[in-house]
Image (cartoon, rainbow, N blue to C red):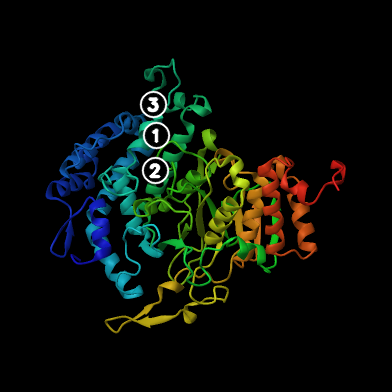
Amino acid sequence: MENRQDLQSILPLLPLSQASSELFWPPNAVDCLNSLSMGPSISKIDSGTVLFHAIVRLRASLGLSEEGLASNAAHGYAFYFDELMFPERARRWFADVVPFLARLLLSLPSLLEVHYRDSDRAFGSGNAGLRVLYPQEAGIVFLSQELIAAFLACSLFCAFPQRHGYDLPVINFDDLFGSPGSGLPKGYCQSGYTTAKKWRMLPPDATSSQRGKIDCLVHYFERVSSSVPTGVVSFRRKVLAFRYADELSYPDVDFWRQSNTALCSFRVSLSGCIEDQQYEILEVDFANKCFGGGALRRGCVQEEICFMLNPELIAGMFFLPPMENNETIEVIGAERFSDYKGYSSTFHFAKNHNDTRPLDYLKRKKRMIVAIDALCRPGVNQFKTGFLVRETNKAFCGFQVQSHHNPYLKQSKESVTYHVNESGAEVIHPSCTNLPDEVLGVATGNWGCGAFGGDLEIKSMIQWLAASQAGRPFILYNTFGVKALQRLEEVTQFLLENGWTVGDLWTLLDEYGAQRYSGETYIGFLDWLVPSPHLGIH
């Protein structure tokens, strides 16, 4: 273990120590966790207030006392578990869930040792073990759901150190818990809202979204404490090489202009959500360039909600630095644990979700999520050719099936490519580890619009171009009833009926962009491309 480059890249980010070939908790940390694991009758940890005191002691045992937590974290833990959580549920939480999580943390060193051993056996030494996946380093990491649960328990207990010298967020939950108490409306004293019943009477934009996020995470911990999931989740950094490498090189404007690839089928949904499809599909995460965005802070839009429904995604924030222009992040196997209602300030946990997706041959749930980050507030520059190329390539990188083999062939366990490693053992070739059983369609929507300021019509066309070029069979586009896209189905079907190619659409998109940038036109792209009779444009 001591000579592993993958482990050495991640070790400064862990709350563990290493001596020789062994990972271990410091002795004082073991004492703290052992106490937590014994339940409230012995540990006396039976409230949010006392739990936070235990967290402070655990951090002190790890030498983290000088690294401050969010100023309202102490109140947040007390407020949530002592005031918002119903008494019977709180009793079960402290009697069953907290001791389980402490035991899980005590097993973290052995879980990591098993992780690296099994990773080497399956994929070859250093190919898929936990490590920092730096920018421009295409690679994949496989984590068991049990190991991910241990990492998230570390987050709940705020046991992770600061990331000095790393462009990575600290994934402790102190900022998240610091929000509910601090979000009370001005003019109201906290004592006026000291019961869960009165808290629920607060205006929905006061603290409901932050409480909803914590509710999802607490529900996740309750679920894993009752039955530890046994599957696997993979995290892949996908890179379109800027220099010529193969079919995964970064396309230039001529590539898009000259493409003869037919446009794929385009389906429009006026309602519904990306994550609610009843069949296997590639789900698009409208990502921040920092994977996870504000999931553990105050953000609560599409990406953050995705991370709360599928909390195992949070583990990727631990080792995936920000994406660059030619990169995306693909996750396969993250289990969904929660259903929800509302959006942004009205987001709240609704009920448990039983994820019935089958497993693939690598024990991953057949749920594929790809994080693609759009340009943030590009203004009129988004219509320039270089910006159009950047956005199209970003989506293309995310939608591409990244493999050295034909990415569109049916993949099964029997057809996986194996190679012999240095020890003479047969291992799975890493390039095969993200191929789905069949090529999936893409479920997406108004990517990069809203707060990011992207043009709705342009972004829909960009994603269509990228999905088509990547060989996806269809794109399912959720408009959420936005008026600007009311002609989307009409226009896309017209183009399909007339046999348009990627190159045809790209050429006119680029021409429109030039006119829009120069001020020659201000009408939307759909009306510019296929004029509606009532507009009087011919």
Task: Check disc 3 and report its element: helix, strand or loop.
Answer: helix
Circle 1 sits on which residue?
Answer: 85
Residue 466 in sight from this viewpoint: yes
Viewer-closest of 512 and 264 = 512
- The image quarter containing residue 93 is top left
x and y percentages locating residue 468 in the rendered image: 64, 64
- Of the numbered discs 3 and 2, the one sitting upstream in the chain is 3
Q: Amino acid at mark 1?
A: Met
Figure check: 420 above or below 289: below
Q: Position of residue 187 (x, y in %)?
A: 44, 15
Residue 509 percent coordinates (x, y): 69, 53
- Residue under label 2, please give it: 218
Query: Which residue appears at 77% of the width and 46% of the height?
Result: 527
In front: mark 3 or mark 2?
Answer: 3
Local SS, label 1: loop
Q: Which residue is mark 3?
A: 182
At label 3, which amino acid type do we have?
Ser
Q: Position of residue 430 (x, y in %)?
A: 41, 72
Give yes or no for contact between labels 3 and 2 (Cβ–Cβ under 8 Å): no
Residue 334, by quadrant, is: bottom left
Quarter occupied by residue 496: bottom right
Q: CA distance from mark 1 to mark 3?
A: 17 Å
Query: From the viewer's perspective, is 311 left or right of 499?
Result: left
Quadrant, the N terminus: bottom left
Which one is nearer the viewer's eye here, 503 or 1?
503
Q: Bin the neighbour count of mark 2 within 10 Å (Cα to Cα): few under 14, some 14-19, many 20 and up.
A: some
Q: Please state if 498 lies on the left or on the right of 48 as rendered.
A: right
Contact between marks 1 and 3 (CB within 8 A): the answer is no
Q: Secondary structure at mark 2?
A: helix
**Image marks 2 and 1: residues in contact by CB distance under 8 Å:** yes
- Return the disc, 2 or 1, that comes first in the chain's sequence: 1
Q: Residues within 10 Å of mark 3 (few under 14, many from 20)?
A: some
